[in-house]
């Protein structure tokens, strides 16, 4: 990601960013209860680690990555305090192949919708390099059906499909909610499930 994006996210952690709600996103919990996560999980843009720690507590080997060092430090501290084994790394979401590991499942909870247009295809290729054939990606992002207001830009299903066309095929899509301190009832979102070709 561009340096200015990482700097802005790092600056947000001087306080409590809107997206840091102190618990896993309800849609992630629901997905887990439905059996949506298999084997090892890569949490891309993990923030302070609530989704990662939830999945690790359910027995999944989890690696959470984020470009903001403060977020990763907080995630590591939470893991130590709670006695949960999960790995957290400062890493570029556009270079996931450098992790040199093929994961079974990946989670993007609120990262895709902050990417610049020119980075979307690159991000899809990066995820493809980190998932083995048949690997599953769950992507939760703001929907174009969310009215104008605070928060990141809104994204359509078509934009997601177009960005991931080639290395991935969409296998599921549903209307969802993405919770933040600015959207306590949850912003309208898409939960897309894609499979690595």
Image (cartoon, helix red, strand yellow):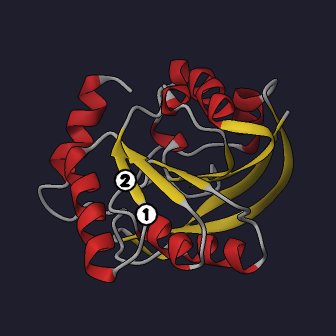
Q: Position of residue 94 (x, y in %)?
A: 49, 27
Which residue appears at 40% of the width and 31% of the height? 92
| Left or right of residue 78, residue 159 in this image | right
- 106 or 123: nearer the viewer: 106
Task: Residue at 43%, 63% (x, y): give it.
Answer: 86
Furthest residue in direction left, as rendered: 14
x, y percent for residue 119? 52, 22
Q: Answer with left or right where residue 101 lies relative to residue 99.
A: right
Residue that appears at 42% across and 69% down: 85
Residue 90: percent from left, percent from top: 32, 41
Who's the residue at 59% across and 78% down the image?
A: 58
Which image quarter is the N terminus in?
top left
Q: Nearer the viewer, residue 95 or 119?
A: 95
Estimate how packed mark 1 is, as few (under 14), some (14 to 19) or many (20 or more) residues with alpha carbons within 10 Å.
many
- Residue 114 visible in this rendered orientation of the protein: yes
Image coordinates of residue 34 in percent, x first then y, are 78, 77
- The residue tagged 2 is 88
Q: Name the image quarter holding residue 167.
A: top right
How far apart marks 2 and 1 lie (CA) works out to 7 Å
Q: Tell me the number on the disc at residue 123.
A: none
Determine the image quadrant of residue 100: top right
Q: In which quarter of the image is residue 80?
A: bottom left
- C-beta proximity under 8 Å, tags 2 and 1: yes
Secondary structure of the residue carrying numbered label 1:
loop
Residue under label 1 = 86
Q: In this view, does 101 lie to the left or right of 151?
A: right
Q: Callout 2 environment at 10 Å: few (<14), some (14 to 19), or many (20+)?
A: many
Q: Residue furthest top?
A: 118
Residue 114 lies, with reference to residue 71, above or below; the image says: above
| Res 179 seen here | no
- Tell me the element at label 2: strand
User: Is 44 or 20 nearer to us in this picture?
Assistant: 44
């Amino acid at each position: 990601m561009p340096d200015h994006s990482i700097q802005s996210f790092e600056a947000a952690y001087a306080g409590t960013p809107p997206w840091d709600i102190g618990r896993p996103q309800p849609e992630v919990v629901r997905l887990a209860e439905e059996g949506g996560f298999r084997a090892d999980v890569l949490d891309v843009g993990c923030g302070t680690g609530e989704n990662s720690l939830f999945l690790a507590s359910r027995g999944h080997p989890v690696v959470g990555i984020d470009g903001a060092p403060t977020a990763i430090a907080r995630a590591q501290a939470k893991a130590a305090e709670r006695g949960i084994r999960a790995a957290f790394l400062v890493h570029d979401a556009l270079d996931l192949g450098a992790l040199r590991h093929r994961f079974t499942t990946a989670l993007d909870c609120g990262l895709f919708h902050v990417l610049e247009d020119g980075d979307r295809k690159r991000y899809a290729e990066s995820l493809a390099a980190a998932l083995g054939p048949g690997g599953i990606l769950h992507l939760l992002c703001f929907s174009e059906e969310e009215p104008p207001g605070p928060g990141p830009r809104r994204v359509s299903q078509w934009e997601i499909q177009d960005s991931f066309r080639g290395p991935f095929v969409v296998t599921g899509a549903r209307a969802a909610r993405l919770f933040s301190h600015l959207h306590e009832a949850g912003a309208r979102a898409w939960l897309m499930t894609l499979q690595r070709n």
